[in-house]
Structures are given as C-alpha cells and as structure tokens.
Image: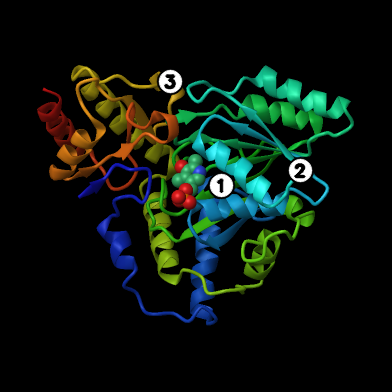
Amino acid sequence: MLLLNPGPVTLTERVRRAMLQPDLCHREPEFFDLQDEARTRLLAVYGLPADTWQAVLITGSGTAAVESMVASLVPEDGRLLVIENGVYGERIAQIAAHYRIDHEAVRCDWLQAPDPAAIVARLDAAAAAGRPFTHAALIHHETTTGRLNPVAPLAAACRERGIHLLLDGVSSFGAEAIDFAEEALAAVAAAGNKCLHGVPGLSFVMVRRGALARAARRAFYLDLGRLAELQDRRNTPFTPAVHACYALVEALRELDEAGGWRRRHEHYAALAERARSGLAALGIESMLPAAESSVVLRAYRLPARLAYDALHDGLKAAGFVIYAGQGGFSGRMFRISTMGDLHAPDIDRLLQAAAGLVD
Ligand SMILES: *Cc1c(COP(=O)(O)O)cnc(C)c1O
C-alpha cells in the first residue's frame, strides 16, 4: 500500500530497518548521541549555525511542536496575530485560545493567499490602539488546500514593526525553501513524518536562541524552554520516542546523501506535475494554480459523477491511499501528497487506476 495522504508517509526500507537497532535506555550516553545527531542534522538541513538556531525535539505529532512553539514563544504579556486560510491556521488560533494567549485571527478565504495589506492594516490598527502585536503566526504550506503561503511579505511587515514570526512548517520543512536568514522569523515547527520521511511520534521546533530567552512557561510537557535547555545538556525531561529518533536520524542521513532539501523539492515537483497533468487529462481539475501550490500536496476537484468514497475505495483496492477534503471541502475535493518513498512509476500506476474509475 502506498500512502498519498499528508503523513505518515511510505517509508524507505532503510528507515524502516533503522527502527530495529538495539533497545536504548533514554538516560544512557547512546541515546544522547542519537539525540545529538538528530538535532545537528536538523540544523544541517537548511545549513543553520548552531550559535543562532537550535533544534528542539518533541515527542508527539506535528501538532505537539506547533503547540509547544505557540504556548512557549508568545511571552506572558505578548499578543499574537494568527493568519488563517485553512484548518491548520484555525488550529493555531484554537491553541492560543486554549492557553488563554491574548490573540486575534485574520480569517482569509481558504482558496486565497492571505492579503498582506489586510494583515498590515490589522498590525497597525492594534499598535495605534495601544495594544500592538508582539507575534504573528502563519502556516507555510496550508495542507488543507495545498497552498504554499508566501512568507516574505508578512515577514517584511513583521520585521519593520519588531514583531516575531512563528511559522508552521510541518508540511514544508525539508522540501520547500524557508528563509531562516529573515530576522523576523523566530521559530519553525515541523515533524519527522512528513517531508523528512521519518515515522510519526517525533516533532521538533527550530528556534532562535534569542527567542527562547523570553519564553513563557505556560505548557508543562511541551515547555520548549525546558526541553531546549535539557537537550543542550545531553538530557531529556521525559521518555522520548526512541525508535522514532532512530528513524528520523536515518531519514536525515538519507536526505543528505540524496542531495538535501533542494533535490527533494525537485523530486516532489516532478511527481506533483506528473499527477496533475495525468489527472487533468482525465478531466480532473486542480483546486489551485500549480504556481500557488506546494510541491508536497495538491488538491483536486472531485468530478461531479464520482463520489469521494468510490474514488478512495477504488484507488485503495489498487494499492493507494488518498486523502479527503477537510471542513467545507469534504465531498468536493480530494488530495494527493507525493511525500515519502514514491517514484514516477507509482504515479503512473495511480493514474491508470484513476482512469478506470473516472470512465
Ligand atoms: C500535518 C500537519 C500538522 C500536524 O498534524 P498532526 O496530525 O499533529 O501530525 C500541522 N500543520 C500542518 C500544516 C500539517 O500539514
């Protein structure tokens, strides 16, 4: 079975076998060597200097990393502006509400890119009212629709106003460009089981060391400042997902040997284009223009004559798991992710199976 859902992904045999290494106690040097390698290799994915950036591992799915980032990096007296154009943007606002973080949301059309002018207006209105935002949160790749949200315009607006940007890069880290040199960028949350091709259970936050200095202590298990401090001292507060760490390290070695994130970006782009053009030939339209989509996942309009379940079940019988539309898109949309150990012949077989269902 090949997974075309946005994580967990189809593993390579090499990563799968990496989990069969010796059992480790998480308080022995062997585990801390593994933890150190994971953290060092995460920095290396985007060539980040260890004196400025820190990779903090978190046991939990991608949401754990996003929650840890939001709950910890917005200081007690901070104010957060959340930019929403999909399910994951909404989730950040839910997290902020849950921790009673002073926040507002800019709700954008889920099929549109956020409007920079509207965001700037909100930032400036809050400042003029004497309640300036200290932080803004954006989803990099909004997996709801496959849109790659432009980060640069928002980051520039934040930089000019001294606002820190928190990025949900869960479904982009390892396959899309991320400008870590942008001073406004304080942190990026991501996970091992999406573009990095590890297994679920381990996520991480790439965080500027300076941003941690003012971290809040709202969360207990997900306290980013504490996790960072202990990991820097070759320690850990709780039992980490040891086997997921084995898998992540092996997946990061594999990524590096295969030419890094740029090479992965090209590979995904070729697969996404192959799927898009093949589906277009069957009369299935993309929800978004290719130029506005990530290379990681694409959303397609469900043909009027075809129910989602029939498409899903038919493709599953042929060995592929696709993903439904979320929220208001259920019944109207389906999604195909090309993360994981997937290759052109897999997409060709998918298209063949789809052709049999569309006719
Ligand atoms: C997958 C994903 C998450 C995390 O979801 P989990 O179910 O916790 O793995 C967060 N943000 C985005 C954009 C995602 O694609």
Q: Residue at x 49, y 35 (%)?
A: 141
Which mark lies nearer to you, 3 or 1?
Answer: 3
Residue 232: image location, x then y, percent? 65, 67
Q: Which residue is mark 1?
A: 47
Q: Mark 2 packing: few (<14 Cα in 10 Å), some, or many (20+)?
A: some
Whether label 3 touches label 1, CB < 8 Å: no
Q: Which residue is mark 2?
A: 102
Q: Amino acid at mark 1?
A: Gly
Specify whether tag 3 is near ligand 1 (CB below 8 Å): no
Which is more N-terminal, label 1 or label 3?
1
**Image quadrant of residue 84?**
top right
Distance between the alpha carbons at the discs numbered 2 and 1: 34 Å
Q: Residue at x 47, y 36 (%)?
A: 176
Q: In front here: 272 or 309?
A: 309
Distance between the alpha carbons at the discs numbered 3 and 1: 26 Å
Q: How is the image coloured?
A: rainbow
Q: Which mark is residue 265?
A: none
Q: Amino acid at mark 3?
A: Ala
Q: Which residue is mark 3?
A: 291
Q: In front here: 71 or 116?
A: 71
